[in-house]
Amino acid sequence: MTRAPDSGFQSSNLPGWQPTAPAGLPTAPLPPPPIAGHRRRAPQRRFLTDQAHVWLARLPPRFQPLATARAHPHIVNRLAELWPMPDQLADYFRELLFSRREGRRGFSFDVLTELLDLQSQAPQRPH
């Protein structure tokens, strides 16, 4: 192993070797490795789509998930997409509210309340 001049990082010709930051410098955490059998999630949008804005405006004010839109715009975007599809919407609510995925922190009380209220207003599956 050799030390690169002036950089503070070590370099090597060994396969699979990666440079490390000098001691004391902050480093970004590495993303968790993918779980076997799970698909990699798409990046989450940090803003509401036009479709979500229209959908929110059409909901009665009491059921507009504004705290959810601020904290989790990607969820409101997905709800707006799925609202006309009762089967998929019910599955999405189930995934949101009852997920067994590791590392999930859960929702704040405001967001959870909005999601439960919204679920009560969702179009139902045809019998």
Image (cartoon, helix red, strand yellow):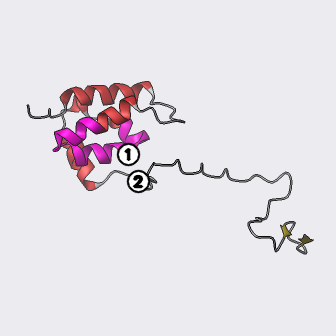
Q: Nearer the viewer, residue 7 or 20?
A: 20
Of the image marks 2 and 1, the number of the one nearer the N terminus: 2
Q: Nearer the viewer, residue 103 or 28?
A: 103
Which amino acid is tagged 2?
Arg
Q: Main secondary structure of the magenta part?
A: helix
Q: Which residue is mark 2?
A: 45
Secondary structure of residue under mark 2: loop
Residue at 67%, 50% (x, y): give it. 29
CB under 8 Å between callouts 2 and 1? yes
Q: Nearer the viewer, residue 62 or 35?
A: 35
Q: Is residue 80 left or right of residue 12?
A: left
Residue at 88%, 73% (x, y): give it. 4
Specify the farthest residue to the left. Answer: 127
x and y percent of residue 87 in the render?
A: 19, 39
Q: Is residue 15 above or below residue 58?
A: below
Q: Whole-Å distance between the Cαs marked 2 and 1?
A: 7 Å
Mark 1 surroundings: few (<14), some (14-19) or many (≥20) residues within 10 A? many
Of the 4 image quadrants, the one containing the C terminus is: top left
Give the extent of the magenta segment: 67-91
Q: Is residue 81 left or right of residue 16?
A: left
Q: Which residue is mark 1?
A: 73
Secondary structure of residue under mark 1: helix
Q: Is residue 59 left or right of residue 36?
A: left
Residue at 87%, 66% (x, y): give it. 8
Mark 2 surroundings: few (<14), some (14-19) or many (≥20) residues within 10 A? few
Indicate whether residue 112 is drawn in magenta: no
x and y percent of residue 122 in the render?
A: 19, 33
Q: Nearer the viewer, residue 52 or 89?
A: 89
Which amino acid is tagged 1?
Pro
x and y percent of residue 76 in the render?
A: 32, 43
Q: Is residue 30 left or right of residue 76?
A: right
Residue at 86%, 53% (x, y): give it. 23
